Amino acid sequence: MERETTIYDIARLLNLSAATVSRALNDHPAINSNTKQLINSKAVEMGYRSNTFASNLRRQQTRTIGVIVPRLDSSFMSTVLAGMEKVANEANYNLIISQSLESSKKEMTNAKTMFNSRVDGLLVSLASDTDNLDHFNTFFRKGIPMILFDRVMQQKNCTNIVIDNLKAGYEATTHLLEQGCKRIMHVTGGIKRNVYADRLKGYKMALLEHGLPVDDELIKLTNFTRQDGLDVASDIAKMPSPPDGLFVASDLCAASCMGGLRKHGFSIPKDIAVVGFNNDPIAQLVEPNMTTIHYPGQEMGEIAAQSLINHLNGLLRISTTNTILLNYELIVRESSRRI
């Protein structure tokens, strides 16, 4: 492999000092414009690349933030990442993004890679089977700041950025009850994660508050895939007493389930009223348009990145708060409108 061109190679060729070349390439005002132009032209001709990473390391900073998410093929997560990217670009920081694929083992590998890449800080949304944060201990020991968002776990070394998932689950279920539903099914994900555990608690709380029993037959644990939605629809079609309301903690799964229910002869919302979660684009593409909880993904990404960057720049200590709570909104559309 061809050796990298250095500032010493350029200096030797132009009969200048390495210090002059370095200053010219960094647009230092002490170097006149003609010399700058000569040096920059020669650098381009020789294929010189600035080693920003080495330069940042000398300043004990890489201006790089690591991001670990469960999956990249999620509409919600893409909006979160868009928010992070926007803030990071404006602050002249770079992001290194990786996905755990819902595996704590892969999450451990990602954490090690981020640490070895010398990121200045870390933004993490946990995998579905993560039980503890031991694999981030190297960050805690080194004082490298870390913020958890969306899928979080209480830890004294981290700030969590979330919505009130319990209240959101309660409101989604209460809306169905107010539409006259008496038998409501809840489709959820792995309840190790706060987001799904809290939405389930909210669902149960709403039922009990309205004098209705919690029926385990009406609680389905899934991975929120398209096939899971179809499988739930098939299960409902086989039930002697099917639900008249459906609260699914994922818009994609809810949309798939709606399609499956129609194929089995159910009318939405007449037979089954449906509420999803996230306000993904698919919620307004399905017919009827889906009632859902708007989860502010872009705002979450922006606040997570800005909080971390402010901390790195000495403008804020993220340790002063355990939790940042964002607002959500119930958006009522035709899929649940029975009254």
Image: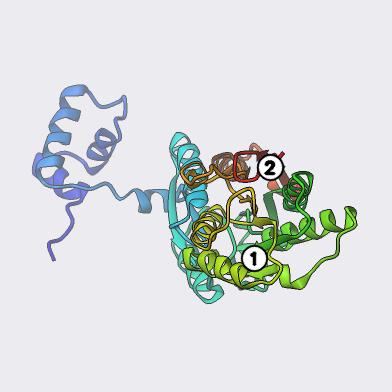
Mark 1 residue crowding within 10 angstroms, few (<14) / some (14–19) / many (20+) = few
Of label 1 and label 2, which has the lower sequence position?
A: 1
The numbered mark at residue 314 is: none
Q: Which residue is mark 1?
A: 141
Res 136 quadrant in image = bottom right
Which residue is situated farthest in the bottom direction here?
105
Quarter of the image with the C terminus in it: top right
Q: Amino acid at mark 2?
A: Arg
Does any portion of residue 123 appear in the rendered image? yes
Q: Amino acid at mark 1?
A: Arg
Query: Which is more toward the observer, 18 or 283?
Result: 283
Residue 137 percent coordinates (x, y): 63, 69
Query: Which is more toward the observer, 303 or 134?
Result: 303
Q: Would residue 141 appear left or right of 115 to someone viewing this image?
A: right
Query: Which is more toward the observer, 285 or 262?
Result: 262
Res 328 quadrant in image = top right
Q: Which residue is at 78% across, 51% downward?
A: 170
Residue 67 percent coordinates (x, y): 50, 55
Q: Is residue 87 above or below residue 80?
A: above
Quarter of the image with the N terminus in it: bottom left
